[in-house]
Image (cartoon, rainbow, N blue to C red):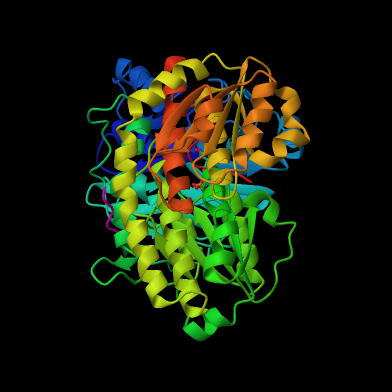
Amino acid sequence: MCGVAGYVGPKKAGPILLNILKRLEYRGYDSAGVAVIDNGKIFAIKSKGTTADLEKKYLKRENFGGCIGIGHTRWATHGKPTIKNAHPHISGHIAVVHNGIVENYQTLKNKLIENGFKFKSDNDSEVLAHLINYYYNGDLADAVSSAIGRVVGSYALIALSVNAGMLVCATKDAPLVIGNGVDGNYVASDIYSIAQYTNKIMRMVDNTIAIIEDEKSTIIDPLGRPVILDYENVDLDLKDDGFFNYPHFMLKEIHEQPKSFQDTLSSVISTMEKDITLDIGLSETEIRSLESAYVVASGTSYHAGLMTRYLFPQTAGIMVNVETASEFRYIEPRPNSLFIAVTQSGETADVLASLKKARDLGLRTLAITNVKGSTVTELADKTIYTRCGPEFAVAATKTFTAQIAVLLILAIKLGLVNGVITSKDAKIMVSEAEQTPRYIQYLLEKEADIQKVAEQCAESECCFFIGREYLYPAAREGALKMEEIAYITSIGYPAGELKHGPLALVTDKSHVVALATYGRTIRSNIKEVQARGGDIIAFVSEGDTEVRQIATKVIEIPKTKPIISAVLCSVAVQLLAYYTAKEKGLQIDKPRNLAKSVTVK
Ligand code: M6R
């Protein structure tokens, strides 16, 4: 799971590749590398860590030129995140970058070793460089074609040779796009990374090979027959990628939520009439005939999806199954169902695989994503966008709350068509949803109080986040945030379940974060924890008098409808995790071992 980049044209390749790689870092930042051809030789620079580390190294050795090159940013799967395992991999006159997994690499490696090739890394991708070299007979495209004929697995690879003034790319089950610019041709794992150079984009399709030269790009199939793929003009908003006055992207993105929630909402409702304008690509008759819905997602997006467990039966009048994408492959969905993929990036491999499965089974498919032109938008029958602008921090924040906004409006729409709610009910619900940005803003003003509480959490050995109903997914989301950026073992549990096991872990070194903004039942769960010595941080509704008496620390949240309360609690736990990580002096935006988008299954 990595980002790959290539450039061929009249300009110096190194700085262009670095710029593209910076925008691909969401796919991994364990190591990075570039290779360019200059004066008939391959010059490669690799570094452990982010592209910024690579850039420092590059700037010290800027003496090499070269107008053709490839680059890579890595999320380690095979082999540790070391320089030795960083791409590009080089075999004689060939250099290769690869995103994907070579599943039969050990067999190929053994054969190549028998043929005299020497391996320098523990990485599966190195076999590709040697294999292409092995098959090279004066024609790079031929060699790539023969090499991929031997590969079992997935790949988006870019190869160059000292002997050929071109890049040769191949793809299967991993995305690759080609950009045609005034100053040369580009190739990369996504559109966004090359949109800074051109908006004329062609998406490669599986089992094709691209020959990219200074003036043109040619697509062929593995037998060398031409394949016609069209360029499209994409229009992406690339302006918003600075920290402005925030120390981290995560904090900036948390603070953007009043706007991102509002923008998303405004894209699916008419603010004047309070009507729903959301189009899901199904007629009313088709909606009424749906048997059930499957909401499939990973990580934070899965937690947004979990809200539908309560929302859909009550409001939409439809049964729903919420599944983690990596498990969907083991599930037989009911035939006449709507499949809803929720994915910030639109590139999560497990989500894409689930969507393909649903499509193959004949289900109607809907995608909710934040990224225009992402792979999920190509695969789904219909896409609904969250309007958050780019989210750079690995920890998802503003996209989570915007996904809930879309799911809420979707539920209202389905409920209206299914006759579960009246149009008067719908208008009231829409008006309530419209108040959310204002409440989020109000909550953000309590940031200093949450920061104080976070100072205590930083000492914690283990955090339990508990909630009921809509507050349960919010609790899970809090735990995920705390784990991924503050590195504190955390569990998000239904409040009533603590006593069935996890209570055994509660000690005076643990904190329990109780999302207790509505419903009384959680009070007894809090008491159970208190009796075992755990410190209790409670988020309660304004005016609460009950929980306040038993919790160690209390933060008040505006009193709202349950699902909106869950949105507000989610923002609160985002801040809690952020300030805990900050207190611990952690890197926050790029937590260890993770990547923004997980493009392997
Ligand atoms: O792009 P996606 O929404 O499909 O990503 C899914 C997860 O990888 C993602 O939500 C991950 O859990 C976040 N880093 C959590 O903050």
Q: Looking at the image, is 490 positioned above or below residue 330?
A: above
Prevailing secondary structure of the magenta residues: loop
As drawn, is 64 to the left or to the right of 322? left
Q: Is residue 33 visible?
A: no
Quarter the N terminus occupies: top right
| Along the line of sight, the residue nearer the viewer: 382 or 299 | 299
Question: Which residue reaches farthest bottom?
Answer: 285
In the rendering, at what x and y percent does residue 20 appear? 35, 39
For image coordinates 58% across by 44% down, the residue present is: 472
Quarter of the image for residue 360 reads: bottom right
Quarter of the image for residue 173 reads: bottom right
For image coordinates 60% across by 36% down, the residue present is: 523
| Tally of marks | 0
| Along the line of sight, the residue nearer the viewer: 267 or 145 | 267
Q: Looking at the image, is 290 positioned above or below residue 407?
A: below
Q: Looking at the image, is 23 positioned above or below residue 231?
A: above
Quarter of the image for residue 475 reads: top right
In the rendering, at what x and y percent does residue 78 appear? 65, 31
- Magenta-drawn segment: 233-237
In the rendering, at what x and y percent does residue 429 appear? 39, 64
| Along the line of sight, the residue nearer the viewer: 5 or 424 | 424
For image coordinates 57% across by 49% down, the residue present is: 302
In magenta stretch: residue 516? no
